[in-house]
Image: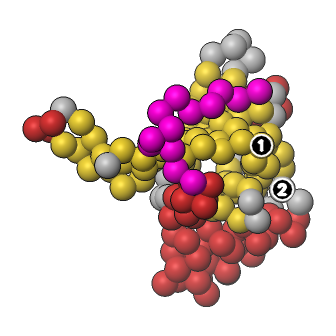
C-alpha cells in the first residue's frame, strides 16, 4: 500500500517520528482538489491520542477537499540546519498518511485546549475563555493516522 523508505540509513524509528510530531510547530496538510490538483497548506496542529488535530473555519478549500476525499497527507519538518558550504541540509522530517474527519465535541474541546497549551501556554486562562467564545465558529478536524515515516539527515 505504501512504499518502503529507500534510504533505510536515514529512517527514524516510530518513537522518534512521534516525538517530531509532538514537537513540531507547523505542519503541511496536503489534500486533493476536485479538479485533481494537490493542495498543500501550512497549519498549526497538535498530536493527541495517535492523531493529528487542527482547527479551521467552517468552510474553505481545505474542507471542500476533505469532503471530496478524506485521504490526506501531513508533513512536519524540524531541526533544520542549512549547510551552504556542503550544499546540503540537516533535518528531521515526518510524513504521515491518514483520513481526515470532523472531530466530535469532546475531541474538539480537548484539541482546542491542547492547541492553546502548545502555542500560547503562558496564556492558558485567556485561551480557555477564547475557546468558550469561539468554539461554535471553529471546526476541529482529526487525522486518523494510517501510516507514518520519519527521515533524518545529520
Give residue 25's position: percent from left, percent from top.
48, 58
Q: Is residue 37 left or right of residue 152?
A: right
Q: Which numbered circle lies on residue 33?
A: none
- Of mark 2 and mark 1, the one earlier in the sequence is 2
**Which quarter of the figure has residue 128?**
bottom right
Q: CA distance from mark 2 to mark 1?
A: 17 Å
Magenta-highlighted residues: 1-13
What's the residue at 84%, 56% (across, down)? 103
Give residue 43's position: percent from left, percent from top.
55, 49
Give residue 94's position: percent from left, percent from top.
54, 46
Check the image and report above or below for 139 versus 115: above
What's the residue at 44%, 42% (across, down)? 10
Tell me if I can see residue 61 in this picture: no
Identify the main secondary structure in magenta: loop
Query: Quick one: label 2, few (<14), some, or many (20+) residues within 10 Å?
Result: some
In the displayed image of the protein, which residue is found farthest to the left?
A: 85
Q: Indicate the quadrant containing the N terminus: top left, top right, bottom left or bottom right.
A: top right
SS label for mark 1: strand
Query: Quick one: label 1, few (<14), some, or many (20+) residues within 10 Å?
Result: few
Tell me if I can see residue 41 in this picture: yes
Closest to the observer: 3 or 109? Answer: 3
Closest to the observer: 126 or 85? Answer: 85
Q: Which residue is mark 1?
A: 146
Q: Is residue 22 magenta?
A: no
Q: Is residue 5 magenta?
A: yes
Name the colouring of the figure. secondary structure
Give residue 119's position: percent from left, percent from top.
51, 69
Q: Which residue is mark 2?
A: 103
What's the residue at 89%, 60% (across, down)? 104
**Which quarter of the figure has residue 89?**
top left
Amino acid at each position: 500500500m505504501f512504499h518502503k523508505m529507500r534510504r533505510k540509513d536515514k529512517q527514524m524509528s516510530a518513537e522518534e517520528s512521534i516525538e517530531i510530531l509532538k514537537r513540531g510547530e507547523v505542519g503541511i496538510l496536503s489534500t486533493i482538489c476536485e479538479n485533481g490538483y494537490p493542495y498543500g497548506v501550512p497549519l498549526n496542529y497538535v498530536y493527541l491520542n495517535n492523531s493529528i488535530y487542527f482547527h479551521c473555519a467552517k468552510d474553505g478549500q481545505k474542507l471542500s477537499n476533505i469532503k471530496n476525499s478524506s485521504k490526506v497527507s501531513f508533513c512536519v519538518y524540524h531541526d533544520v540546519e542549512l549547510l551552504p558550504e556542503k550544499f546540503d541540509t540537516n533535518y528531521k522530517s515526518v510524513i504521515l498518511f491518514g483520513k481526515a474527519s470532523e472531530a466530535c465535541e469532546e475531541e474538539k474541546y480537548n484539541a482546542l485546549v491542547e492547541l492553546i497549551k502548545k502555542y500560547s501556554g503562558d496564556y492558558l486562562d485567556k485561551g480557555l475563555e477564547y475557546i468558550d467564545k469561539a468554539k461554535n465558529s471553529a471546526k476541529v478536524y482529526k487525522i486518523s493516522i494510517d501510516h507514518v515515516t520519519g527521515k533524518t539527515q545529520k
